[in-house]
Amino acid sequence: MTRKAAAKTGGRNPDGTFAPGNPGKPSGARNRATKAVQGLLDDESEALTRKAVELALGGDTAALRLCLERIAPPRKDAPVSFDLPPMKSARDAAEAARAVVRSVSEGELTPLEGAAVMTLVEGVRKTLETTELEARMQELEARR
């Protein structure tokens, strides 16, 4: 259904369900008030930043938090270090997975860190498995 047709039927399909999208507003269009506020902020960004720093230096804890979050945002990821056996074959990935689970159970890694490392281990396992299968197929084809 086109936008014009949807607009004529109150934005509904022939079966009565709502048509996708918003027939009255183009995709990505901004509200007039949003545009006005954005324009004001763009024009005054330097002065606002300077004022926030002045307030932070004057002891305003909210301004201080705002400034610090911009200077040094909270880390979303951090490196982890633990013993992981080398993976030279797909079979070795099982031992690596056991090492990850062991590290999580002993508190060396958090469950989220363990899950992230397990995703990496699984990716390596798939790569090694594919490489091993390719080598076996080439060997079989060479025998023919």
Image (cartoon, rainbow, N blue to C red):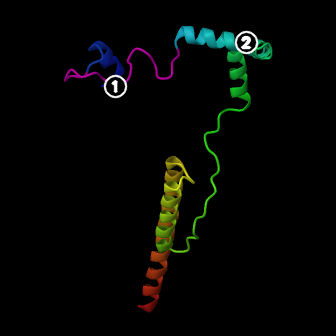
Picture disc at residue 20: 1
Q: Residue at image x 50%, y 60%? A: 102
Q: Is residue 85 left or right of residue 21?
A: right
The quadrant of the picture occupied by the N terminus is top left
Residue 39 horizontal/vertical position (percent): 66, 12
Residue 40 horizontal/vertical position (percent): 68, 9
Q: Residue at image x 48%, y 63%? A: 97
- Along the polypeptide, which appears first: circle 1 or circle 2? 1
Front tag of 1 and 2: 2
Answer above or below: position of 118 versus 2. Answer: below
Badge 2 density bin: few <14, some 14–19, many ≥20, Cα 10 Å: few
Element marked by disc 2:
helix
Q: Is 136 colored magenta in this rendering?
A: no
Residue 108, image quadrant: bottom right
Query: Cα distance, mark 1 to mark 2?
Result: 37 Å
Counting labels gives 2
> Can the viewer see residue 64?
yes
The quadrant of the picture occupied by the C terminus is bottom left
Answer above or below: position of 78 versus 124. Answer: above
Q: Is 18 colored magenta in this rendering?
A: yes
Picture disc at residue 85: none
Magenta highlight: main SS: loop
Q: Residue at image x 51%, y 18%? A: 29
Residue 98 horizontal/vertical position (percent): 48, 64
Residue of label 2 = 43
Q: Amino acid at mark 2?
A: Asp
> Can the viewer see residue 130?
no
Span shown in magenta: 13-30
Q: Amino acid at mark 1?
A: Pro
Answer above or below: position of 55 versus 28. Answer: above
Element marked by disc 1:
loop
